[in-house]
Every structure is written in structure tokens, then in C-alpha cells.
Image (spheres, helix red, strand yellow):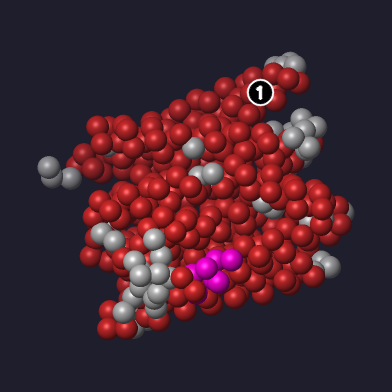
Amino acid sequence: MAERMSKAEFIALIAMMFATIAFSIDSMLPALPEIGQQLSPDDVNRAQLILTSFVLGMGIGTFFTGPLSDAFGRKPVIFAGAALYILASAVAWASSSLELVLAARVAQGLGAAGPRVVAMAIIRDLFSGREMARIVSIAMMIFTLVPAIAPMAGAAVIAYAGWRGVFMSFILFALVIILWMGFRLPESLAVEDRRPFRLPLMVGAVKEMFAHPTVRLSIFVQTLCMGMLFTMLTMVQPVYDVIHDRADSFPFWFGFVALMSGSASLLNAAVVVRVGMRRMVTWALAGQILITSLVIGLNMSNLSPQASFALFVFWQTMVFFMAGVTMGNLNAIAMEPMGHIAGMAASVIGSISTVLAAAIAAPVGLLFDGTLAPLTTGILTMCVLAFGLMLHMGRIEDRLPA
């Protein structure tokens, strides 16, 4: 790698590959009203499925992408995923029905799983130890900026080219990645280090993981936390537009919230070593239950429009913040007993939790009725369930021998 690409250039490329998911989701948010009006005028809420359908495809793709890259190499899997992503984007751009757009979004998600999973494998191939951790940290710091700017980028594209232009920007984004990678980054997995793709091994990994109580519980809690995040993402644009009449300023508020909630990873890194992963997750969920209950109570009173909007922005920030604190810790909890099948376990955890979270968020999002009730009730219910599962996990750990 050193002969072709500097470390700074490598980190920039990896960060862009990480950003594929956030860009594909968040830049669509400003387009939902226009898509709903054009393709589903009888039920504009169905436009929200454009988000969860992508997440569903991404979750399914995550299950296979890692093992496929172990068998055939990193670059072929990324190129194949990017080709599918580009083709699906073109289909969505040309679609005249919402159903076809949704099918294309599922295919987009399948393709986007390539950069999401394989980028981390490339880092593992080329670096180890503290240097690997440093590179991942820098790339993730760059990645955290994407949710802040993606809605604004999407809004700018829509202003000039309409909602279909967003899908053209996806094509351009993917082309930049594959051309950059194709010409500048050599294949990182040698032929002699590749492992055959065996579906029975993946099925065995799923069985082993769900047989372990801590791993099983952490996957369920991660599913609920991702469900809360995806539910907020599916409803956040209608809330700004319909309830608060701030559709024009939505991308800027979303960017502000994303930047503020990005500090969650910094807080977690500073505290988790002393407190422990399970307590961090449990405390974050307990705090979210209290905050969401407060939001429900205050919304039942006669708040002024300005106070109601400020309360929602605060709550949105706290939901994103909670996701930032819990997701990494839950993933680490699940991975800790699975070191002997780490690569397979990472794919299984990411796939199962993402698919189930999308299956939860999609129907809740369709319940939007012009009030916050479906969103607050849905998130509070998921949070209470997740908190109960974490308490149960604590009781199981207390029974284990020291």
C-alpha cells in the first residue's frame, strides 16, 4: 500500500467507504415529502419506507459480505457491491412507482453492505494493534461529519435537480469510490490467505451465538436501540414539516443535532473503562426512559410552539446520543465471548440486528398521524424493553463465577 497510497489518503478513502451508509440514508430525508406527493399521494407516509427498505437490504447484505470477501478478496466484493448499488440507483432514478423505488432501495442496501463491512476488513489486513485502532478512530471521526452535512447536500441537489437527482448523486459517489480504490489501493488479502465460503459455517455461528445468553441478549438490545434510531430517522422529517412547519430549515437543524450527539462516542471512550460496557448501556437506556417520559408529559401541556420545537430538538439529540453510547458497547459485549469466530460473528450481529430493527421501525413509522404520539410511544416502549433485557443480563452475569 505504501508504494501507491499514503496513510492520509488511505484514511480518507476508508472514511468515504464508511460514509456510504449515512449518505444513502440521511441525504434522502429532504426528498421524502416530494416523493410521497408524486408516487404515493393517497398515503404520503409510505415514502418513509424508502429509508427502512434500504436498511433492510443493508442488513441482509451484511450477513454475506464479510465471508464473501474472505473467499474472493476485498476488492472484487466491493466492486460487485458498488455495481449493484449503481444499477439500483439508476432504477430508482427512472422509477414511476413507489414500489419499484422501494425494490431498488433494497438492492441499493445490498450493494452498500460491501463498503460498510469490507472497509473494516481491509484495515485489519493492513494494520494491527494500536495503529489499527488509531486509523479506525480517525476514519470514524471523519465519518461522524457525514450525517451532519448529508441532508443539506440532499436538499441542495433537490433544489437543482429534484428528488431524482439524489439518486444520481449516489451513482457519482459510488463511482468515485470504485475508481479511487481501483487505481490507488492494491488488493489487501493474498490468495493464499483466503477461506472458502461455507454457508453451514455461518448457520453454525448463528446457533452458537444465540445459545450464549449474554450474546443473545445483547443482540436483542442492539436491535431495539437500532429500532429507536431508525424510527426517529423515518419520522423526523415529517415532524419538522407537519408539526413544526420547519421543512426549509430541517437540514440545518438535523446537522446541528448530529454534531451535538456526536460527542457520545467521546463521552463513552472517557468513561467506559471505569464504568463498564453493561452499566453504560443500562444507564443510557434509563436516562432515555426518563427523558422520553418527560417529553410525553410536557407535550400533553399547553407549550408554546417555540418551546415545543425546542423540546423536540433536545429529545432528538438525546435519542441520537443514546444510540451513540449504546451501539458500540452492545457490539463489544456480543463479540467478547466470540473471539474464535470474530469475523463471522460481526457479520451475524450486524445483519440480524439491522434487519430486525428495520422490521420494527417500518410499521411504527407508518403510524405517523400529525402528532408526536406514535414516535414517543414507540421509542418509549422499545427503551423499556431494552432496559428490562439489560437488567436481566446483569442478573445473569452476577450468577456467573468470578
Given residues 215 and 56, the one toward you in this image is 56
Q: Quadrant location of residue 359? A: bottom right
Question: Quadrant location of the C terminus?
Answer: top left
**Left or right: 121 with respect to 231?**
left
Instruction: Locate residue 108, reporting x and y percent.
Output: 62, 67
**Left or right: 82 with respect to 399?**
right
In the image, farthest residue toward the front: 3
| Residue 339 included in the magenta stretch of the image | no
Image height check: is 270 above or below 58? above
**Which residue corresponds to mark 1?**
310
Please report the residue visible at 39 percent of the width from the left and 61 percent of the height from the top: 6
Question: Quadrant location of the N terminus?
Answer: bottom left
Q: Quadrant location of residue 293? A: top right
Instruction: Locate residue 77, reporting x and y percent.
Output: 47, 76
Q: Decide whether the magenta segment is chiefly helix, strand or loop.
A: helix
**Left or right: 197 with respect to 192?**
right
Which stretch did the figure color magenta?
A: 176-182
Image height check: is 101 above or below 243? below
Image height check: is 345 above or below 136? below
Given residues 354 and 387, the one toward you in this image is 354
Label tally: 1
| Residue 180 included in the magenta stretch of the image | yes
**Left or right: 44 with respect to 55?**
right
Question: Given the image, on which type of amino acid does mark 1 rest?
Answer: Ala
Please report the residue visible at 57 percent of the width from the left and 52 percent of the height from the top: 22
Helix, strand or loop at label 1? It is helix
Please report the residue visible at 26 percent of the width from the left and 36 percent of the height from the top: 273
